[in-house]
Structures are given as structure tokens and as C-alpha cells.
Amino acid sequence: MEHARPLPAYLIQRYHGWKATTWTENRAWYRRLAEEGQRPRAMIISCCDSRVHVTSIFGADQGEFFIHRNIANLVPPYTPDGEQHGTSAAIEYAVKALRVAHLVIVGHSRCGGVQGCHDMCSGKAPELEEKTSFVGRWMDLLRPGYERIRDLPAEEQLGALERQAVLISLENLMTFPFVREAVEGGDLSLHGLWNDIGEGGLEQYNPQAGGFEPI
């Protein structure tokens, strides 16, 4: 691949620092992870946003979470069409091969993907309507959420749409037969969270109350 280039120097320096400290101090643990394989208790689906750091939020060790990240932490509906589906493949592996006990969707404040969906659906981002826009076509998954919040006061819409991204993902998860079977059999539980990045807050969806509540 002629276009590949060496890592930036600052990343190389950080790697050497990690290898000399964290890895050296926990050498036996890393070798155990390599030899015994992963046994994560939970799968986390979160946003690609660099500010979202779920392992820090939960104080998780390496090997504890099976993590998948995509734009706006969205789960598409079950679509067995023979095409390539990265998020669906990750879910299948987590549920059927790793047999995780928990599947957690983590949304967050000031989400750029959600902002893009809002702009697209309200006619402010025609470029996202183009068929060639990967982001736009991915954010089509959230269009039903926009319809649910479009009549709210303008200042409340983005926060509500961020939470809708979590709810739509939870709804779509249940369209996967193997997810539904695991949930109904008591082997898997689904959870929806929303993280306020600036305030460090965390809310969880309570289906009994029909909304998100602070943790």
C-alpha cells in the first residue's frame, strides 16, 4: 500500500511509554488475556466521538468490555441481505460467540452525528441528502427519532434526539432474532445510557417511567 505512512512521532513516543510502564507492570495480565482469550461481560455500543471514553467512565480494565463504536451509537435493524454490515456483525459475535450478559447503548451530549441528522431532516444540510454521503445514509436510521421530537421547543430538540438515538438502537436490537431470543431467555439484558460530557452526568433509560433518569 504505497499511501501508508509511518506513525506520527508523538504516537510512537506514547507507545514506548506505555510499553515501558503499564505493560511491563502488568505483563502477566496481558499474557493471560492473549493466551486465554477474551471473556467480556458486556458489549458497549458508543459513538466514534473522541470525547466519549466508556472505559474511563466505568473504570474498566482491558478485556472487560467488547466495544463497538460508530457515528451516533446507532444500531440498524436486522437486515440479512448478504451485504456487509459492521455493526450487525459485531452484535452477532458478541451475543452468539462471546455470550455477553449485557448490551449497553451509550449516547452523549453535543453529538455531531445527531446534529447532522437534525440539520439534514430540517433542510439545513442538503449535502447529507446526497446518495454519496455515507454519513447521511447512516443517519437515515435516526429519521424516525427526528419525527418524534420535531415539535419540541428548539432548545430541547438536540438533547431529545440524542436520547432517541439510544432508544431507536434499543428498538432495532430487538429485531435481531438471536438478540430477542437471548433477552427473552434471560441470558441478555439491554441498557440505554446518555452521557453529559461537560457535566460528567450519566442517565439511564427506565422503560417503566418511559424516560431517562440520572444515575
Image: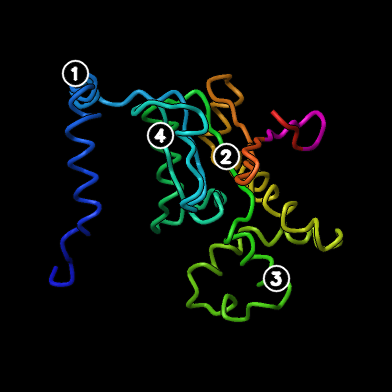
Badge 3 is on which residue? 121
Give the foreground label among 2 and 1. 1
Which of the two labelled residues, at mark 2 and mark 1, occupies the earlier sequence position?
1
Q: Are marks 3 and 4 in contact (CB under 8 Å)?
A: no
Residue count near mark 3 (Cα–Cα under 10 Å), binned few <14, some 14–19, many ≥20: many
Quick one: SS at disc 2?
strand
Which of the two labelled residues, at mark 4 and mark 2, occupies the earlier sequence position?
4
Which of the two labelled residues, at mark 3 and mark 4, occupies the earlier sequence position?
4
**x, y percentage for residue 208?**
80, 28
Residue 208 in magenta?
yes
- The type of residue carrying mark 3 is Cys
Q: In whole angstroms, how far apart are the C-alphas of marks 4 and 2?
A: 12 Å
The residue under the point 61% across, 59% down is 141
| Above/below status of 45 relative to 1 | above
Badge 2 is on which residue? 105
Q: Are marks 4 and 2 in contact (CB under 8 Å)?
A: no
- The type of residue carrying mark 1 is Ala
In the rendered structure, the answer to whether residue 67 lies left or right of residue 8 reads right
